Image: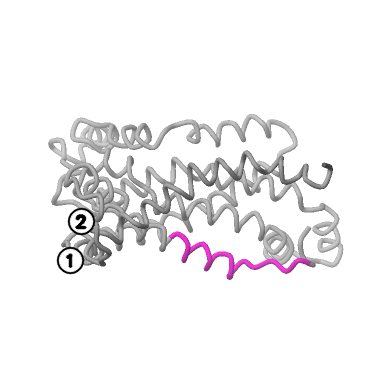
Amino acid sequence: MPRALPYLLLLPASAFLLVFFFYPFGLVVVESMTRDGAWTTGNFTRMTDHWKFGQAVWNTIWLTAIVVPVQLVMALTMASVVQKLKTGRSALLYIFAIPLGISDLAAGLIWLAIFEQSGFLNSILHSFGIIDRPQLFLGYQSVWVIFLAVCLAEIWRATAIMMVILVAGLGLIPKEYNEAAEVFGASRWQRFTRVTLPMLRPSLQTALILRILMAFEVFAVVVALGGTTLPVLMGETFQWQFQLQDRGVAAAYAMVILGLSVAFSLIVLRLLHVPKGARV
């Protein structure tokens, strides 16, 4: 009985994953590769032939490529500030983490209130005499403004996720390493780049993978700020599933998102590989 106990304890979680993850995942795979009951690549062909597919892929990749590095720098800075504080650390951590409690859609609506025609930005610009009348910043003619607004909303909303992970990682690094480097004359920048960052790799891996996966799944913020003007992969998945009523193409989009997520996660794992002997 004692030998079987670990397997019995794992059984509920394994059954849950089997029923609520692997089985639905298998259904999506089959859905993406069948049409009218026959195996085919027609769903993928229809998806790639659609004029929005290329835009959706590049918009999603560009959004990830811009937002994630900016968030990484901001999260590292915020985590370093929080880690060095001796008083008020918990209060500042809670303040930084406030956006974590706001849903994607609510974050999009908050930034919509800033950029819309009767919003905060137009009021400020008009009060300073920069514009004569309210401007339509989020119109279909200004896709780059919508893209910028989505980037700002995503940076504001999700930087705290990376910060919390990095704060935990910084707390695991023994102070003796930095103190020893300081004794040997290392500057503050050298201690950060040659001691702190290498030892923070496991936390960086987790933070980057989690944030990249979330970036590929961006949806509600884009819908709130741009509707269908700015196509992204998750938005197109929703459109094909519920508006165009084509579950096969929607499943094909889901497989593309999965493939990109796995590929970029593997790249992060490879770039930030931590040898077993080097782990704290």
Q: Is residue 60 left or right of residue 167?
A: left
The magenta-colored residue range is 261-276
Task: Characterize the local packing of mark 1: few (<14), some (14-19) or many (20 or more) Cα atoms within 10 angstroms.
Answer: few
Horizontal and vertical percent for residue 23? 45, 48
Q: Position of residue 194 (x, y in %)?
A: 71, 67
1 or 2: mark nearer the eye: 2
Q: Secondary structure at mark 2?
A: loop
Q: Foreground: 146 or 64? A: 64
- Dot 2 corresponds to which residue? 36
Q: Main secondary structure of the magenta part?
A: helix
Q: Residue at x 37, y 35 (%)?
A: 107
Q: CA distance from mark 1 to mark 2?
A: 19 Å
Residue at the spot 16% in from the left edge and 40% down from the top edge:
135
Classify the position of the N terminus by image quarter.
top right
Label 2 packing within 10 angstroms: few (<14), some (14-19), many (20+) = few
Q: Quadrant of residue 29?
A: bottom left
Tag 2: amino acid: Asp
Q: Where 113 falls versus 244 (above or below)?
A: above
The quadrant in which the C terminus is found is: bottom right
Q: Nearer the viewer, residue 1 or 51?
A: 1
* Circle on res. 49: 1
Contact check, label 1 and label 2, Cβ < 8 Å = no
Q: Mark 1 or mark 2, which has the lower sequence index?
A: 2
